[in-house]
Amino acid sequence: MSFTNPSKVVPEADSRLEEEQRSQLGKSGQEGRKSKQRHFWQKHPKSQESLPHLLAEGQATSSPSLTSASETKNDRCHTDCLETPLNHVFQRLGWAVGSYPWFFLLGPMLLTAFLSTGFVHLLKDKQENLEEQYSPMGSPAKKERFFVQRHFSTNDSLSFSATRKSTEFNFATILVLSHTSSLLKPESFHEISKLDHAVQDLSLVKENGTRIHYTQVCAKFGDSCVPSNPLLVAWREQKDFDLKNITFPIFNFSHQTIYLNSLLGGVVLGQRGKTQILLEVKAMRLQYYLQTERAEDNNEQSRKWLVHFLKVFGDLKEGLNLKKIQAVYFSSLSRQLEFEATSKTVVPLFHLAYLLIISFAIISCYRCDCVRNKMCVATFGVISAALAVVSGFGLMLYIGVPFVIIVANSPFLILGVGVDDMFIMISAWQKTNLMDSIRHRMSSVYSKVAVSITVTTITNVLAFYTGVMTSFRSVQYFCIYTGTTLLFCYFYNITCFGAFLALDGKREVVCLRWLEKSDSPDQKCASLKRSCCAPFGSLPDEHGTGIHPMNLFFRDYFGPFLTSMESKCFVVLLYLMYIISSIYGCFHVQEGLDVRNLASDDSYVTPYFDVDEAYFSEYGPMVMVVVTENVDYWNKDVRQKLEQCMRQFEENEYIDSSLTEFWLRSYVQYLGEAKQDVNDKDTFINNIPIFLKNFSNFIYDINISSSNEIVSSRAFIQTKNISTPASKKKMLQQFRGIAAKCKIPLLVYNQAFIYYDQYTVIVENTIRSVIIASLAMFVVSLLLIPHPLCSLWVTFAIASVVVGVTGFMAYWNVNLDSISMMNLVICIGFSFDFSAHICYAFVSSSEPSVNQKAIEALYLLGYPLLQSALSTVVGVCVLYTSSAYIFRTFFKIIFLVMVFGAAHGLIFIPVFLTIFGSFG
């Protein structure tokens, strides 16, 4: 956004060098050039008033120079206090780049070569911690987990209990789905048993030649591996087992209680007296728990067995030739491995993206004038953006900023945004005089556009760096990488790319001399010379006006059409429909990152999650209710207070009260049956060891100190009907609310709460980031566009685009998660670019009517803004072909930002300015 006055003069040294250059080129060339200039300005007197660097000849993009279309009469729009010193600095920089192009060309390249060595710190074998990157930092669940880990322990090799684990553990899961109406048939159970035996017979050979068998790594209860499905074991042990006499959700078999709610899915129940009997079962879960002790070698062996399981299960399943059932599988490693595999799918897209953006740049910068053709310069501009990516990423890796997978989105965005400044500089260069010296032309270019690209860089970088304040590390790292890379992109544009532009200017001079000499009859090899300096052998356009046809389209057709009364009414109606549908969508956007979206669409985990959601979504995880302090359990009042809290949990809509496990209830009943006084402290404490021997499932639920004090204890409640993000959020808030109000100090925890916490903070984080970024943009607009009307309309446009993007996310099946939140922050900077340019051009125009002001603003900036949106979309469009949700989401939101941003800049804001601008 440049506010430079076009009448500013260059230093006296420029004038002297200009005269020297002109004398060297000859008076005939000078007079011919002046004649053509007079011919152009006589033919287009209004264009002489317009600032030539705004026309951009179709080359400018989202950061077009916003210098006034003519000398404004409104003193409020002058910003010389900030801009004049900057212009002087950039004039001198342009002079230096024009004087020493090789220094400014090779210097950044050497810097890139040095920073590229930072990629040695990119650890390919290091696994990305999904919990650390995609769950909120400092969340309540992490504090709750820390307490549980300190006070409760488990032993995978002796008495394993999955519900009592406080952290993730090693496991493999198979979901068996019946091809018929029910699995409750002997032939189906026979095939399930055959599959189960085949899995437990899996083994692999280690490097030293020894084998790792399932029995060596399985989690155990007593001397045996924890059964994959107790119901299947019961069917094997009892030959006459009646599959039509199974109660649900609790089934008692040989004095053993089996909880079937998480083991069977798609159940159809019948009533037999007061008990529920299984009539049909559509799916069954086979769960293989493995040892997870971190301090021992067991964990590593378990992981190796799991990798082997994932590798061979497909072939194993086909070899069994299953007829009655089908099986889908998953493991504790699947999410991590598939997420890492997802990152590899985007690598081939880099090459396609660079090819597309280079093609777009060449097409945009092609001119029939062979002297001013800038195809090679445009290609180098894309290379400059690539150098910025290497430098920015290399520096971050040197510093030690972790490279997370979503950072792989950044180069695509940098490609689209980074070339914008290149188009601006080429546009300004095309408006300089060929007869001037290279230093004079570079000084002129920098004085006109350097402030513009500086301000737009500042706004975009500010928008990214506000993302550092979010609670998600992955978003922080993405914003740091992208913001820093944008700074490098800006630095390389005003140094490296500017130097290449200066060198190409020398080619222009040489090319022009050759072409002038080729007209003489004595000149030989004229065609060869033309082909060397002029693409396609074309000649300079002797009578061209220098105005791109698209600029004329916006001035002569689109502008008058948009400012007609009928069009204004239609635009207002269209905007009302847009904002109403957007607000409606905002209330229906889903929150949170679905774990299945971390894998590719064609991954084996996708059918697993589909079956799990279809048949096992009724019941959620078992939640711990932990008594966090030492309380007198033998005190009747304490027990009543605790029981009252437990009843509040069980009365909650998300709890199945029939599946609660609470050691204190069982212990009180046990003491009552033994005729012991439960209210006596010594009796209560001394009988606990005997009780735990008889009820070993509670052995990990009571933390007794060496002084026989119950430091803490826990109960378990079974959740249900929490398949949606909204229900998970509501459940978590209600549970914590009940625990906070209880007179006994409680906390609730399950390892899944680590990810559920994102539902409680994602909206808050998004709103905070958007507000902070918007305030930063507002301050920038006040400082650099000190016109109240401009600042207000810019703020309005930012809010409108953010609401639109958020609302339409719901229609495009994009959740509000850490990935989309990151893109909404990006939305702020782009919205500023689109709206600020049009607003400032409107208020700076000296045209008498608001319609003419709007037409002039569109004439100067319509095509550049359109080109900005197109260049960014071209840079990220290849991501839509990705099979990964992360990359497709990035494209979807950037696409929405560009479409809505361009719509505001080219349609809504111009119309609103004609309606309300006269009151500014």
Image (cartoon, helix red, strand yellow):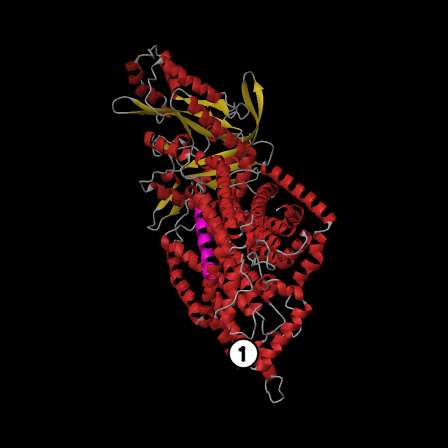
Above or below, 309 against 664 in this view is below
User: Is residue 289 rendered to the left or right of residue 537?
Assistant: left
208 is higher (above) or lower (below) than 262: below
Residue kind at label 1, given as amino acid type: Arg
Q: Main secondary structure of the magenta part?
A: helix
Q: Quadrant of residue 550?
A: bottom right
Res 326 visible: no
Q: Is residue 410 magenta?
A: no
- 573 or 812, which lies in front? 573
Q: Position of residue 443 (x, y in %)?
A: 49, 67
Horizontal side of 558 relative to 242 (left or right) equals right
Residue at far left of view: 707
Q: Position of residue 162 (x, y in %)?
A: 41, 32
**Where residue 594 sits in the image (x, y, percent)?**
51, 40
107 vs 148, nearest the viewer: 107
For residue 804, say whether it is visible.
Answer: yes
Screen quadrant of the N terminus = bottom right
Report x, y in % for residue 314: 50, 46
Q: Residue at x 44, y 52 (%)?
A: 481
Q: Is residue 480 magenta?
A: yes
Q: Secondary structure at mark 1?
A: helix
Q: Which residue is mark 1?
A: 22
Quarter occupied by residue 583: top right
Report the magenta residues as a range: 476-493
